[in-house]
Amino acid sequence: MAFEAPVAEILFSMREIAGLDEAILGDVGFETVEMILAEAGRFAEAELAPLNRVGDRQGVVFADGAVTTAPGWKQAFARFAAAGWSGVSASERWGGQDLPVMVEMAIQELWNAGSAAFATGPMLSAGAILALEAHASDDLKQTCLPKLAAGTWTATMNLTEPQAGSDLGALTTRAERAEDGSYRITGQKIFISYGEHDLAENIVHLVLARLPDAPVGTRGISMFVVPKFLADEGGGLGARNAVAAAGVEHKLGLHGSPTCTMVYDGAVGYLVGEEHRGLACMFTMMNVTRLSVGIQAVGVAERATQEALAYARERRQGRAPGHTGEGMSRLIEHPDVQSMLLRMTSVTAASRAICYTCAHAIDMSRRGSDADRTFWAERAALLTPIAKAFASDAGIEVASLGIQVHGGAGYIEETGAAQLLRDVRVFAIYEGTNGIQAIDLVSRKLPLSEGGAVSRLLDDLSGTISDLNEARRDDLGRMSVHLATALAGLRAVTDHVMTLTRDGRHNESLAGATSYLRLFGLVLGAGLLAKGALAKGSTVYNDRMVAVARYFAETILGEATGLRRAAMAGTTGLGADAAAVFSHGPVTNDKGEGNKR
């Protein structure tokens, strides 16, 4: 089926749920945002969506250190750059559009729904632009930012090494000072998305490395820009730098996105920020990129939902209850299929709402009043791991359900449903696994301001419950009752985890962290959808939102009870349970032989 950009739903989520307003937009009004998203939607439909299967089937070709992308990709990227999409969030000083993060995320959702493999490259460039604007020297900004904003150059982030994945303190890539003020970078990086390709004339790698006198651990990491081609005195392309791709990975999904092993052999690099403080610079990029990963999942979930719905409307199978007349029923008439489609739709909507709400907090921390910026920065920090983990887990679930709706046809590559599940699976892994997001939530973000950020967010959800009760609308059903019950559970677990953290009982708090994050996401998602359901009377109101919010609250939110129990039990019983399970090898008989069937 042809992908249809859900611009109206995106705009509704941005305005009525996340809170996009004129104060954030500045000189860019709502009408302009609508036109931008409509144009982004057309580009996703016409240019990117047709490339999705091509990229999956053709993949990339690696030969003699060079990567050739799938047929049509280079031409599409040229049109992408010419249309100005590479610089949507870059400052106008560098030729960008200086749009709010929420608008950028909405555009990224459309790109990812069109082709997640294609969208991964521009997503990384957008994050690099942010990091360089915040930390690079003026000379480095002048060299890189106009090219990145124009799409003439692209960017990568180089963190992972064979022995240093999530533990960045173990990285060994070396940096040595040169007499001219630059540095020489030597080492190997793995799993580098778009580390080599033929889409742009140059690639700038943001690389983490250690200087000879660096402290041990993460405090001794510095960040460098290492370009594929050095810039000459006029700003054009000069000599080839001593960095090259040694190979590409053969992956489960995202076949159109080259994932490279990069080798640095004394390559010229330029320091970003201060020596030994590179991790802070990289996290400027990573924090927004983590939100972008959540948005990637939303885009794929939207695509999976559309394709499953279209198939269910056309495919006939069996006779649904109440079916009369000749012939078989359409799949969409069967209650079980309706349930799957409703779950896909509502989980996608909740994930979208959480991600845009996180983006709004980031925007307010940068563009809001000075007095409120600390509050919004704390909220953005709290929401980021939830947005990344909840949305990516949801994307996997939705894509899997999409296969189920298709039945046997979904397991066949011809329909494209399988590709969506293969593509979305990595979003729970890269940019910090979802387990790490849970650790971040309970270890760092939850104690932020001694719980002030989380308590204020929970109070906002209480306000939504009050609004539901005051509305006295029959169409809202029992949303307020279900949300109140789930919120009480979330408060109880939050207090418990914070107590464990304050007491230094970190193993216990971390054991239930994943269940806690999932619980938080469910309750937050339900509250945000309820907020959308209350927007009746708005010019962009959609009755569909009430149905989606009710389904989420009356069915999916019921899982909060089990998650509360798992989060509380996980914090107290994991150690003993793990010892009992993992301390033994395979079960054997009295002769020392493994059990046989």
Image (cartoon, grey):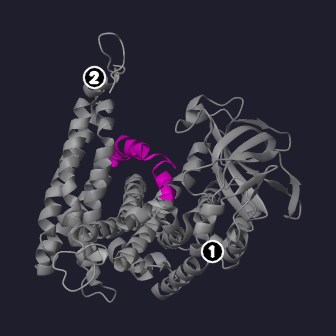
Image point (23%, 48%), residue name = 563
Label 1 – label 2 distance at C-alpha = 54 Å
Nearer to us: label 1 or label 2: 2
Picture layout, residue 149 above or below residue 227: below
Where are the magenta residues, as a range? 422-449
Q: Residue 436 location, x and y as percent?
A: 43, 43
Q: From the viewer's side, name the closer residue of 372 and 21.
A: 21
Quarter of the view holding residue 264:
top right
Q: To which residue does mark 1 refer?
A: 85
Say if residue 457 shows up in the picture: no
Q: Secondary structure at mark 2?
A: helix
| Position of residue 478 in the picture relative to residue 396 (left or right) | left
Q: Which residue is drawn at the image coordinates 85% and 44% (left, top)? A: 180
With respect to residue 166, does 58 lie above or below?
below
Residue 84 among those drawn in magenta: no
Q: Disc 1 on helix, strand or loop? A: helix
Circles 1 and 2, Cβ within 8 Å, touching? The answer is: no
Amino acid carrying label 2: it is Ala
Q: Splitting the image into 4 quarters, where does residue 438 fall?
A: top left
Eyeballing the image, is 380 above or below 335? above
> Magenta includes 428?
yes
Residue underneath mark 2? 580
Q: Residues within 10 Å of mark 1 (few under 14, many from 20)?
A: many
Q: Main secondary structure of the magenta part?
A: helix
Q: Nearer the viewer, residue 296 or 114?
A: 114
Left or right: where does residue 101 sit relative to residue 541? Answer: right
